[in-house]
Image: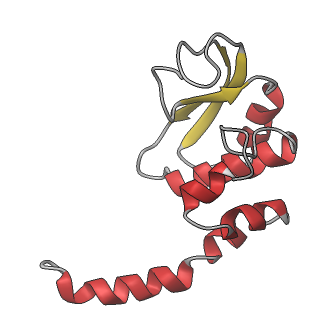
Amino acid sequence: GTTLPFQLLGAPGIDHRWQEALNEKGLEGVAFREAYFNPTFSKWSGQTCGGVEVQITDYESFDPIRTALTMIIEQRRVFPDHGWRSQDGGSSFWLDKLSGNTEVRLAVEAGADVDDVTALWQDELAAFRKLRERHLLYG
């Protein structure tokens, strides 16, 4: 609900601990700044939200997938009961919708780290890369 999607993230009840946990991970190419804001539209409109501002410091070393997974894992670790279900409050999970399956969420719930989670799709990724080779014009 902000004008900085994917850059300013948070929700009511999140505080400085998320930013601290993320910066402690020492991810390359990115830093996290503690942020408090009032979204003007969407789910948390008009409510004070705590969270982080994502600041890319080096585009060459920045890994968006590793960063996003670290953010999800650390949010879950620091705030285990916060924001895991879908926005409509139903029985579905937003992470299942984003990832296209239940594997990522179940791994995070089981305490997996980023390397464990990314390992989940490496066989499929290798198969895709092999399949696409014949379609590449410039090898």
Q: How is the image coloured?
A: secondary structure
Q: Nearer the viewer, residue 109 or 100?
A: 100
Residue 25, position as x, y percentages in the image: 73, 48
The N terminus lies in quadrant: top right
Q: Nearer the viewer, residue 110 or 89?
A: 89
Residue 24, position as x, y percentages in the image: 77, 43
Quarter of the view holding residue 39: top right
Residue 74, position as x, y percentages in the image: 77, 47
Q: Nearer the viewer, residue 58 or 129?
A: 129
Quick check: 130 above or below 92? below
Is residue 113 visible in the rendered image? The answer is no
Quick check: 105 above or below 124? above
Quick check: 118 above or below 96? below
Q: Determine whether, in the image, residue 120 is placed left or right of residue 132.
A: right
Residue at figure coordinates x 86%, y 41% from the top left: 78
Residue at figure coordinates x 53%, y 17% from the top left: 41
Quarter of the view holding residue 66: bottom right
